[in-house]
Each structure stands twice: as structure tokens, then as C-alpha cells.
Image (spheres, coloured by chain):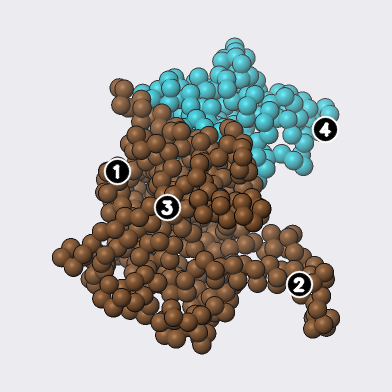
């Protein structure tokens, strides 16, 4: 599986979604960040929320960055990382930011996250954003922009989804959406348009979910 | 981090000295796991750094054929090198241990000792049996990895080190580090097992059995009591040559030697079958090994490895074995290691996290195979920074905890 290029992990992740995650987890919680990158979010959560942090990350250099930050991280593939070795409800939160769309078996992964975690926080790029829709409709090309900077042949996004798809998935699988956040960009928390018509105007969906 | 240097003349650990600690007598013998007793026991060890940092002690455990001389230069070697007009050879982990190096002797007090059963100063089959005044030879009892760790623990007692800041080792050293963590959880603050396993696979046993067979079928072996003659040199060299292949990856052998021939040393019989470079490399590995290693030690230690199973006392349940462990772990494997493959380390990691133990795992991508932890390029590039970061963060945490 290709790893996230620098521009995505470093540039975009250190923004609003980190703050939202930080605001929505309890002080001192036990947290697993799946696909934790260079550990920026976990480091943030450790200093702001004193969480007990764990991470899983596929890239060797990122693992070293995490060790530099004093984080406990396992180098491994998410598709083999969340196995039976974690007991049920081992974590208060399992976080997977911009990760579900790159795994081999998203349903399996989400089920596992909700088994080993009491709650999960999941975010993903919304492929029904109007720019994506218009790009496909008028240009006839797969989406490529600042937030989805890949070509069709090198994208790690193998299971693309929309906000509506995810809500439907939760309903069909007995998953409760406790909170949702629709982000028009990663710099701005909320915009009017993204709130009234998220599946059209939100670039990202971020959900706090639990098993019903 | 500062780049490591191995060249003398620049910054290096000063001349080191191997010391000896002897304990055990007829009244208070060292009791082996088997119930047999052994006395006296001498342990060869070296220390690096300032003893005032004893509260930050790092115990370095060597691999199958290593010794207590982990870093710096011995006086004998320095003098010999000067006489022969060459650079002196430093200890086996000189790139890792020293001032400003990944295991920083400016911060930590570092100890390395030769294992029980070895032949580099610690009591082993080639040591004198006080009962007969002759080397133990065939009379040396079977020992286990736990016995080796028990002997190391006695050394730690002697040095006045109760809680060990970190235990680090590659290969057999890594397995012993795990044994330390499960048998003495109260004494271990952190563990860095590198390229190791929890038990030998059938393939591991098979390779070592062929090695032992090469030794015992050498006519010079003489049932193990060969100390007054030349000894099973051919068998021991053969055992080493074969084992060495398993420590290297196919790719590194290929890149280093391919099918190149050793043409400059052509002799009449070489005309039909000129020597491959890989042959002469292995021959050199074998013959230089014979000069520094005892065949009985090789048998005793490889047997201890073969019979060791970390979960043997825990109904074969690995996560049960780690259930009492109270240490932080940095587990490291090498992608091209086929002696103890990465999946063996993953097994350790999974058992640790099933017990909710703080563990970081990195599978270092390298072509150097099992022996990667000894390779300067790997240490400078990846292994060193990982170990350095882990140790220093832990040290900071500990300092913060003490202040709080």
C-alpha cells in the first residue's frame, strides 16, 4: 500500500480536525491512532489531554518520528494491525483520520475499531464534494486537487466514499453516530454551506461513532 | 545525532579492560535450572561510562559468539595492532556504545558480560574444573538461557544495580533480554530485543544440529575432551560457515560476491575449479572463528538456544508468559532476516500488547539479514537513532516522574 506523501500528512493533518478530535475526547483517555503518521496528533493529545497514546503506522521513517516524540507505536499494516491481539474495549477511542479510504477492508477495519475501542473517530475525504462532482461531470477526469492530490494510478484511496455513504453504512451496521463534523476545509471549522448541504459542500466528514 | 566513528584517534571510548567476578563455592554453589550445581562461577565483564550513573544502567547482552568486550579497545589489541602496524579492532558494538553514540556513555552506565557456558572469560566447558584440575570438557553440565540470565543477575547484584534502566541485545542477547523481563519483572525498566525470537523453529534447530554434528563427527572432538590436542577445528569451522550463511540475506551475499572468482590466488588445482569469492569469504569466517571460539561452548550454547521456549512454563501461552512483565519495550526486527524473521518479532509484539504493555515496534528495512544489528550502515542509518531516541525519551520521562 502506498504511504501518504509528505504534503498530506504534514501539511493538512495539523489543523482543524486535530482540534476537533482533541475537544471531543476525555482527559486521560486511552487512545489508539490507526495510521498515526509522524505522531503529530498523538503528541498533541498527550500534551493537551494527557491521553495514554498508542499508534499504528506503516512507514518506517514515521515510526522513528513517533519514537522521537516518546510515543509507543507499532510499525505495521492496518490491514493486519488490528487483530485479535487487542482485547475488546482496550481503548476509549480508536482514531483513524483519513485512513478508512486507504485500507483493504474498510468494513472489517471499522468493526475491529469498534471492538477494541469503546468509540471510534473516523474522518475521510468526501468524494461527493461539488468540485469532485463537477470535475467528473464537465472535465470527465478523476478528482485531483489540493486535498486529493493524486492521479488515478498512484492514489492510496482505494475505497472512495461520500458522507452519505458513510451515514448509510452506519445505519445498516448498527453503528451509532454520536457526533458529526462537516469540514469545508481543514483551515475552517464550519461553513454555512457545509452545514446545510454537507454531502455537496464538505470536503471532509469526521464522525464520532460507537456500537449501538 | 552525532555521526558514529570507529576510527581510533578520533573520539572513541578509551582503552577498556575486561574484569572478572567470581562467586559460588561448595557451600553456596550456583544451582542450575536442571538442579545440578556448578562452582565457582567466574563472569567476565566490561563496563563503560561513569558508575555514578548506576541508576541508569544499561545491560548489553551479546549474541551466540559475542563476548564481554562490546566497545572500546583492549590494551592487548591496541599494543598488538601497533606492533603489526594496523588499526586496532574495537569491541563488537563499538558503533553503538560510547560517548555521544546511540547508547551514550555520557548519560548511561553500560555493562556487558560474557555468557555462562562461553569461552571468553566466563565459566564454560574450557574452564578448569576444580574437582579434576583439568578443563570440564564433556563433564560441563547442560545449561539453559535462564541459567545464563541468573548468572548475569548475580553480576548485577555484585555491581549494586537493583533496577536496570534498559536491557538490550540482538539475536541470543534479545532472547535473554526477554527472559530477564519475564523472570525478573521488578528489576527491568525497559527492554530492547533486536532480531530475536521466543523459541527456535524446527529450521533453527535443524541448522544448529548440523553444526553440532559437524563438530562431534570431527575426529579431533574426542567426546569433548580435546583440550590437550588440537581439537575439532574443521568441524567448528564448518559449523560456523554454515551458520554464517543463515545470518546473511540472499541479497547481501549476491551483491557482495555474486559468482565472482578468486583468480589472483590461482594455484594449479584451481585451474579446473577456481575458487568462488564467497567460498574464500566463508573459509575465512570459519578459520578466524576457530581462533576465538571453543567447540564445546558452541555446542553448549546452541543447545541452550534450541531447548529454550519462553512460554514453556506458561502452558505454551505466550501472552501468559508476558502477563507479569512491567517494562517498556522497543522491539526491532530486520526485513531481510530469515534466521529469526520479522514475524517472530511480531509475535512478541502481539503478546506484549495483548497484555497492554507499552511497546514500540519497528521492522527496519535492510538487506543485511540477521546480522544487521552489527552493521555500521544500519546502526548509523536506522537502528542507532531508534535506540537513542527511545533511551533518551525514557530517561526524560523518568526524570519528569521523579520531579513530579
Q: Are marks 1 and 3 in contact (CB under 8 Å)?
A: no
| Residue of label 4 | A140
Label 4, secondary structure: give it.
Answer: loop
**Which residue is located at x 76 percent, y 72 percent?**
B276
| Residue of label 3 | B18
On-image quarter of the N terminus of chain B: top right
Other residues around mark 1 within 10 Å, as few (<14) / some (14–19) / many (≥20) = some
- In the image shown, does B21 or B205 lie closer to the viewer? B21
- In the image shown, does A114 or B259 lie closer to the viewer? B259
Label 3, secondary structure: give it.
Answer: loop
Disc 1 to disc 3, how far (Cα)?
Answer: 19 Å
**Do discs 1 and 2 belong to a common subunit?**
yes
Question: Looking at the picture, how far across and down is residue B191, in whole percent?
Answer: 40, 46
**Which residue is located at x 60 percent, y 71 percent?**
B287
**Which chain does the residue under circle 3 lie in?**
B
- In the image shown, does B324 or B92 lie closer to the viewer? B92
**Which residue is located at x 55 percent, y 19 percent?**
A16
| Residue of label 1 | B161
Disc 2 to disc 4, how far (Cα)?
Answer: 60 Å
Amino acid at each position: 500500500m502506498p504511504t501518504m506523501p509528505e504534503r498530506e500528512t504534514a501539511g493538512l493533518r495539523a489543523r482543524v480536525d486535530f482540534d476537533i478530535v482533541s475537544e471531543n475526547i476525555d482527559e486521560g483517555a486511552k487512545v489508539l491512532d490507526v495510521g498515526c503518521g509522524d505522531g503529530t496528533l498523538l503528541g498533541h493529545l498527550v500534551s493537551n489531554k494527557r491521553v495514554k497514546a498508542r499508534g499504528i503506522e506503516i512507514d518506517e521513517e514515521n515510526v522513528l518520528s513517533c519514537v522521537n516524540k516518546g510515543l509507543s507505536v507499532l510499525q505495521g499494516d492496518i490491514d493486519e494491525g488490528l487483530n485479535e491481539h487487542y482485547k475488546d474495549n482496550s481503548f476509549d477511542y480508536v482514531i483513524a483520520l483519513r485512513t478508512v479510504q486507504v485500507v483493504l477492508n474498510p468494513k472489517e477495519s471499522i468493526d475491529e475499531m469498534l471492538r477494541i475501542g469503546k468509540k471510534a473517530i473516523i474522518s475521510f475525504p468526501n468524494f461527493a464534494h461539488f468540485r469532485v462532482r463537477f470535475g467528473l461531470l464537465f472535465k470527465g477526469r478523476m478528482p485531483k486537487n489540493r486535498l486529493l492530490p493524486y492521479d488515478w494510478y498512484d492514489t492510496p484511496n482505494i475505497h472512495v466514499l461520500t458522507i452519505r455513504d458513510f451515514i448509510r453504512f452506519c445505519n445498516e451496521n448498527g453503528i451509532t453516530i454520536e457526533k458529526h463534523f462537516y469540514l469545508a476545509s481543514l483551515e475552517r471549522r464550519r461553513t454555512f454551506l457545509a452545514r446545510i448541504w454537507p454531502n455537496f459542500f464538505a470536503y471532509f466528514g469526521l464522525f464520532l461513532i460507537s456500537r449501538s | 545525532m552525532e555521526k558514529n566513528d570507529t576510527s581510533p584517534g578520533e573520539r572513541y571510548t578509551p582503552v577498556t579492560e575486561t574484569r572478572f567476578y567470581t562467586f559460588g563455592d561448595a557451600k553456596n554453589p550456583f544451582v542450575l535450572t536442571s538442579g545440578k550445581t556448578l562452582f565457582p562461577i567466574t563472569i567476565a565483564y566490561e563496563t563503560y561510562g561513569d558508575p555514578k550513573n548506576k541508576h541508569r544502567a544499561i545491560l548489553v547482552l551479546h549474541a551466540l559468539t559475542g563476548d564481554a568486550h562490546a566497545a572500546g579497545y583492549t590494551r592487548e589489541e591496541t599494543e598488538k595492532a601497533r606492533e603489526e602496524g594496523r588499526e586496532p579492532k574495537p569491541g563488537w558494538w563499538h558503533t553503538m556504545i560510547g560517548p555521544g553514540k546511540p547508547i551514550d556513555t555520557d548519560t548511561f552506565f553500560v555493562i556487558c558480560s560474557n555468557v555462562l557456558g562461553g569461552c571468553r572469560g566466563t565459566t564454560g566447558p574450557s574452564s578448569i574444573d576444580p574437582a579434576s584440575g583439568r578443563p570440564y570438557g564433556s563433564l560441563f553440565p547442560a545449561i539453559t538461557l535462564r541459567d545464563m540470565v541468573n548468572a548475569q543477575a548475580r553480576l548485577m547484584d555484585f555491581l549494586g544495580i537493583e533496577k536496570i534502566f534498559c536491557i538490550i541485545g540482538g539475536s541470543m542477547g534479545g532472547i535473554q533480554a526477554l527472559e530477564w523481563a519475564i523472570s525478573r519483572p521488578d528489576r527491568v525498566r525497559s527492554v530492547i530485543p533486536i532480531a530475536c525470537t521466543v523459541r527456535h523453529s524446527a529450521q533453527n534447530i535443524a541448522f544448529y544440529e548440523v553444526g553440532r554434528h559437524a563438530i562431534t563427527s570431527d575426529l579431533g572432538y574426542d567426546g569433548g575432551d580435546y583440550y590437550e590436542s588440537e581439537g575439532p577445528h574443521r568441524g567448528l569451522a564448518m559449523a560456523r560457515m554454515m551458520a554464517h550463511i543463515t545470518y546473511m540475506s540472499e541479497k547481501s551475499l549476491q551483491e557482495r560476491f555474486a559468482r565472482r572468482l578468486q583468480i589472483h590466488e590461482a594455484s594449479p588445482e584451481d585451474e579446473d575449479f577456481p575458487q568462488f569469492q564467497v567460498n574464500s569469504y566463508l573459509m575465512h569466517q570459519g578459520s578466524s572463528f576457530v581462533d576465538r571460539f571453543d567447540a564445546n561452548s558452541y555446542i553448549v550454547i546452541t543447545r541452550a538456544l534450541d531447548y529454550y521456549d519462553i512460554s514453556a512454563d506458561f502452558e505454551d501461552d505466550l501472552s501468559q508468559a508476558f502477563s507479569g512483565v512491567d517494562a517498556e519495550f522497543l522491539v526491532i526486527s530486520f526485513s531481510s532476516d530469515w534466521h529469526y524473521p520479522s514475524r517472530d518479532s511480531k509475535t512478541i509484539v502481539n503478546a506484549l500488547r495483548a497484555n497492554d504493555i507499552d511497546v514500540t515496534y519497528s521492522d527496519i528495512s535492510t538487506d543485511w539479514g540477521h546480522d544487521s544489528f552489527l552493521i555500521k550502515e544500519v546502526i548509523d542509518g536506522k537502528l542507532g537513532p531508534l535506540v537513542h531516541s527511545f533511551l533518551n525519551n525514557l530517561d526524560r520521562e523518568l526524570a519528569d516522574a521523579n520531579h513530579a
